Amino acid sequence: MSEPLSTSRPAAPVVSDRVLTVPNALSALRILLVPVFLVLVLLELDLAALIVIIISSLSDFLDGIIARRFSQITKLGQLLDPAADRLFIFAAVIALAVREVVPWWVVGVIVGRDVFLAVLGLVLAQHGYGPLPVHHLGKLATFALFYALPILVLGLAFPAVQAVSDPIGWAFTLWGALLYWWAGILYLRETLELTAGPPRGAPASDTLGDRRRSTDG
């Protein structure tokens, strides 16, 4: 007789308070490489900038694998990893705009979305909620943008391939920007749903009293 199939869900990964882990070190390395990359692009040392952004991309890939496989998911890492990604995206898109590789409206679209999310975070905090969980669309948008930028830098470092690399880089950039804002709209909808009621943790008596006053008036 065959054994019944298990219907239990896989256990959620354990998130620790550790600081000194390999994934955290890789995320810190990516943050330290941000100003290095920015200076190299502005000085038009494009091959060196390409090498730096490739190292950053590889470290981003590795830290996720190591964190999951060796149970090194940490609270600090959950902050450092997305921060490193966003800083690299900001630095790259601003540097490329200064070099006139991308127009400044692209900078406004990408930076404006994160300012928008920061405002939503403040609204949620006023209602007793923490940051919203990352949406899959947001992860996909970050992936598209994070890999669009090395492709655009590749065209700067090797002009012979620019006719091929630029259209691919632009496709990733535009899709990333679109998905970035699509995810932002989903975050807005979730924020409106959470903040439609009373603040989180409000005493039940206060809520009941408010309802009575609204019906008595």
Image: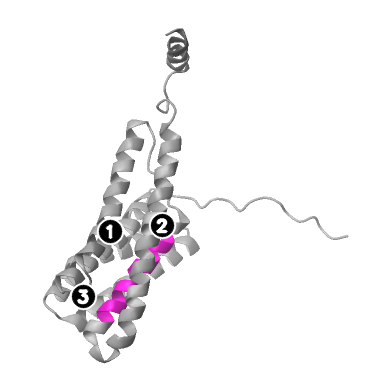
By secondary structure, the bulk of the magenta-drawn segment is best described as helix
The amino acid beneath tag 1 is: Val
- In magenta stretch: residue 149: yes
- Residue at position x 49%, y 64% in the image: 69
Q: Which residue is mark 2?
A: 138
Query: Please, what secondary structure does the residue beneath circle 2 have?
Result: helix
Whole-Å distance between the Cαs marked 1 and 2? 14 Å
Query: Please, what secondary structure does the residue beneath circle 1 have?
Result: helix
Q: Which residue is mark 3?
A: 101
- Extreme residue toward the top, this view: 216
Q: Quadrant of the N terminus?
A: bottom right
Image location (x, y in percent) of residue 178: 38, 61
Give the answer, above or below, for where 213 lies relative to 45.
Answer: above
- In magenta stretch: residue 112: no
- Residue at position x 44%, y 11% in the image: 209
Whole-Å distance between the Cαs marked 3 and 2? 24 Å
**Which residues fall within the magenta stretch?**
139-154
Q: Which numbered disc flags the more N-terminal residue, 3 or 2?
A: 3
The amino acid beneath tag 3 is: Val
Q: Quadrant of residue 86?
A: bottom left
